[in-house]
Image (tube, rainbow, N blue to C red):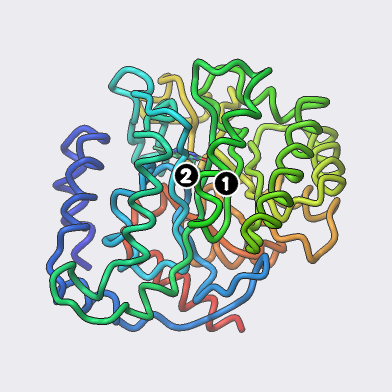
């Protein structure tokens, strides 16, 4: 009820400035306010995916909390899981500002952030601290909170902009080794449109080699640590059907654990149909305009892969109806980003309620 008022005020500010204001505010809410939220009635719809138990199927998509700086606040919104990152081995500042645009009449965002992040060591220390954090606020000394601990944390990994594609594997392996022990699952991001050449890693020999090398590293980490951490790959919504099929085949051969469909789109056709004056900004388009492509990619992947291969659906999930449609299409879990910006945390409980009603 309050979110539309809050949103009207915030939407007067620059989009990235709003992000930089709201997340620290959310994260610093006092223990009592936070617990009221945390224990607010979120219908339970627990499930298991990739061998991990989730309290519900709705997660935060990568990119909102690139460094794991706001895990405490975000974990209070009712999500079953949060994906943090994309993180790279070394810190990098990303593209020049402005680089994030709201397009309200299109229910969309355009971003060309360019993997701005503080580096994998910073993210890792946040994640380790979050796992050890006591209830409510940092000072009350109570035992670990089971609701908060039940939230699953995925880490999305990428390569630094100045790392050539020929050496990209070194960056992915570096991040994989760093976060392996602390993450519930790890996502390999080769589908952002804002790092030049990154999407080439989704194609042909580069794809086959990357997936296989990462699988080998995962197995080696499993034997060193005694822990199996699922490895997922996130794909773009802009691949023709033949490429999606080839991707699915190589994915199957690699025996990695799951897919996320999809990242943002840079399709000219989608861009041409936008209405807002910011429509010509360069970057990845998210929200309503990417929904059809994301659905199509999910459908194609589902048709190519056995039903037990997990696919997390992302891209234009803006309502409980969108969420149930993706689940009906065979998605195992869901992620939102743009929907949270336009509809606030209520979207999470609306989806959770719809999922419970469906089961
Ligand atoms: C501002 C912004 C930053 C993003 N950063 C990342 C990122 O770092 N890594 C990534 O894999 N996806 C990133 N994404 C893509 C989202 O995770 C998601 O896949 C995409 O936005 C589609 O979902 P949506 O329509 O619910 O936003 C970003 C999206 C936005 C809007």
Q: Is residue 311 left or right of residue 149?
A: right
The answer to whether the residue labelled 1 contacts the one labelled 2, judged by CB atoms less than 8 Å apart, is yes
Depicted 222 relative to depicted 32: above or below: above
> Few, some or many C-alpha atoms within 10 Å of disc 1 (few <14, some 14-19, many ≥20)?
many
Seen from the viewer's position, the closer of residues 137 and 19 is 137
Quarter occupied by residue 143: bottom left
| Image position, residue 25 (x, y; %) | 16, 54
Residue picked out by circle 2: 287
| Image position, residue 82 (x, y; %) | 44, 58
Seen from the viewer's position, the closer of residues 347 and 260 is 260
User: The N terminus is located in which quarter?
Assistant: bottom left
Q: Is residue 314 left or right of residue 299?
A: left
User: The C terminus is located in which quarter?
Assistant: bottom right
Depicted 235 relative to depicted 42: above or below: above
Q: Is mark 2 within 8 Å of ligand 1?
A: yes
| Image position, residue 98 (x, y; %) | 29, 22
Secondary structure, mark 1, is helix
Residue 319 appears in the picture as rendered: no
Residue at the image point whose x is 68% and y is 56% from the top: 222
Residue at the image point whose x is 65% and y is 29% from the top: 169
Residue at the image point whose x is 52% and y is 29% from the top: 273
The numbered mark at residue 31 is: none
Residue at the image point whose x is 30% and y is 68% from the top: 76
> Few, some or many C-alpha atoms within 10 Å of disc 2 (few <14, some 14-19, many ≥20)?
many
Seen from the viewer's position, the closer of residues 180 and 252 is 180
Secondary structure, mark 2, is strand
* Gap in angstroms between the C-alphas marked 1 and 2: 7 Å
Q: Is mark 1 within 8 Å of ligand 1?
A: yes
Quarter occupied by residue 340: bottom left
Residue 33 appears in the picture as rendered: yes
| Image position, residue 176 (x, y; %) | 58, 43
Residue picked out by circle 1: 291
């Amino acid at each position: 009820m309050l979110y539309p008022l809050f949103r009207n005020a915030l939407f007067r500010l620059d989009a990235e400035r709003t992000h930089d204001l709201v997340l620290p505010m959310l994260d610093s809410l006092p223990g009592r306010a936070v617990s009221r939220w945390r224990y607010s009635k979120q219908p339970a719809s627990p499930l298991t995916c990739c061998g991990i138990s989730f309290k519900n199927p709705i997660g935060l998509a990568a990119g909102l909390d690139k460094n794991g700086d706001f895990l405490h606040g975000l974990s209070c919104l009712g999500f079953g899981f949060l994906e943090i990152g994309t993180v790279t081995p070394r810190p990098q500042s990303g593209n020049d500002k402005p680089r994030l645009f709201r397009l309200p009449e299109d229910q969309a965002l355009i971003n060309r952030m360019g993997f701005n992040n503080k580096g994998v060591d910073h993210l890792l220390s946040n994640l380790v601290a979050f796992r050890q954090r006591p209830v409510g606020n940092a000072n009350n000394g109570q035992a670990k909170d089971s609701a908060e601990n039940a939230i699953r944390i995925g880490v999305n990994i990428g390569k630094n902009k100045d790392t050539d594609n020929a050496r990209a594997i070194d960056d992915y392996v570096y991040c994989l080794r760093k976060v392996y022990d602390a993450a519930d699952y790890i996502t390999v991001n080769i589908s952002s449109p804002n790092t030049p050449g990154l999407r080439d890693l989704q194609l042909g020999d580069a794809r086959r080699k990357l997936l296989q090398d990462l699988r080998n590293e995962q197995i080696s980490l499993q034997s060193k640590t005694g822990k199996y951490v699922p490895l997922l790959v996130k794909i773009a919504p802009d691949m023709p059907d033949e490429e999606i099929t080839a991707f699915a085949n190589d994915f199957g051969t690699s025996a990695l654990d799951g897919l996320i469909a999809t990242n943002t789109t840079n399709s000219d056709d989608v861009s041409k149909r936008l209405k807002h004056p910011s429509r010509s900004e360069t970057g990845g388009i998210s929200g309503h305009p990417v929904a059809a492509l994301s659905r199509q990619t999910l459908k194609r992947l589902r048709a190519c892969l056995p039903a037990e291969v997990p696919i997390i659906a992302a891209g234009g999930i803006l309502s409980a109806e969108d969420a149930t449609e993706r689940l009906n299409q065979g998605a195992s879990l869901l992620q939102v980003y743009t929907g949270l910006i336009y509809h606030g945390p209520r979207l999470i409980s609306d989806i959770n309620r719809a999922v419970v009603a469906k089961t």
